[in-house]
Structures are given as C-alpha cells and as structure tokens.
Amino acid sequence: MLALRPNCELCDKDLPPAAEDARICSYECTYCAHCVESVLHNVCPTCGGGFSPRPIRPQTAFRPDLKLGLGHQPADQTRRHTKFTKEDIEAHVARIRDIPPNKR
C-alpha cells in the first residue's frame, strides 16, 4: 500500500491524498508536478528513475468488509524533504535526463 506522503520533497507543497499533481517514483519519493517537470525533468534525485501520477486513494470504503479507503488506511503524515542539495540535484539530472526512464 502506498504511503501517500503529504508533501513535495523539494518545494514542500502540500499534496493531500486527492492531489492530482502528486508524482511518485517506484520507491514512492513524492514531488509535485511542477518540480518534476521544471526542476527534476522526470529524474528522481534519489534513484534516477522516472515519475508517474500518484494514484488517488478513495475516501469511502466501497467494500466495507475489506476496510479500504482513507477512513481505514489514512495517508502518511510524516513530511519528508530531499537530502540532496540544489547543486547535486542539478548535476544528477543533467547526467541522465536525456536517457528515457525505461533505459536508465
């Protein structure tokens, strides 16, 4: 189950569970669409992979017997921030941004 992290790890923008501009890598690093497109250029600063839109977890348990939805499995509340400096991210992105994510 995805953690649904609450913020962009770069600019700290709030990304609530229903945020349509939340993006994640395969390790669940979470960034806003603006940072992914304009700063990271679809390169995760941690793993080097690409990003996908984060799925939106339903609020309602449409199958109550399964105890699904935000009421039963809430989003993570722990805010995270990248440990990499702006300069390190720029260098990392520059090295691999022209390699398609499926070739990295």
Image (spheres, rainbow, N blue to C red):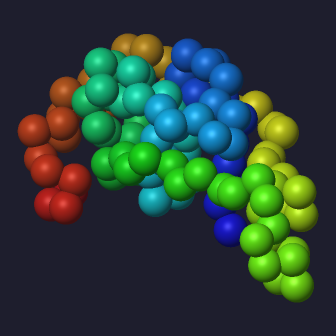
Q: Locate residue 15, reporting x and y percent.
A: 64, 31
> Can residue 46 be seen?
no
* Residue beneath the point at 76% across and 71% down: 62
Q: From the image, which quarter does the N terminus lie in?
A: bottom right
- On screen, residue 24 versus residue 59, left or right, reads left
Residue at image coords 54%, 45%: 29
Question: On the rendered structure, is 29 left or right of 53?
Answer: right
Q: Residue at x 41, y 36 (%)?
A: 45
Q: Quadrant of residue 10?
A: top right
- Residue farthest toward the front in the current orientation of the protein: 62
Q: Vertically, is 32 above or below 22?
A: above
With respect to residue 61, does 59 lie above or below?
above
Residue 81 versus residue 74 in the image, above or below:
above
Q: Position of residue 75 (x, y in %)?
A: 78, 48
Q: How many marks?
A: 0
Task: Give how far across and how far down residue 49 sits, in percent.
Answer: 33, 51
- In the displayed structure, 42 sits above or below 101; it is above
Residue nearer the viewer, 38 or 95: 38
Farthest residue in the left direction? 98
Q: Hey, which quadrant is residue 64 in on the image?
A: bottom right
* Residue 8 is at least partly visible in this image: yes
Q: Is residue 70 left or right of residue 5?
A: right
Q: Report x, y in % for residue 93.
A: 27, 31
- Quarter holding the C terminus is bottom left
Q: In this orientation, which residue lies closer to the viewer: 8 or 71?
A: 71
Most extreme residue toward the bottom is 65
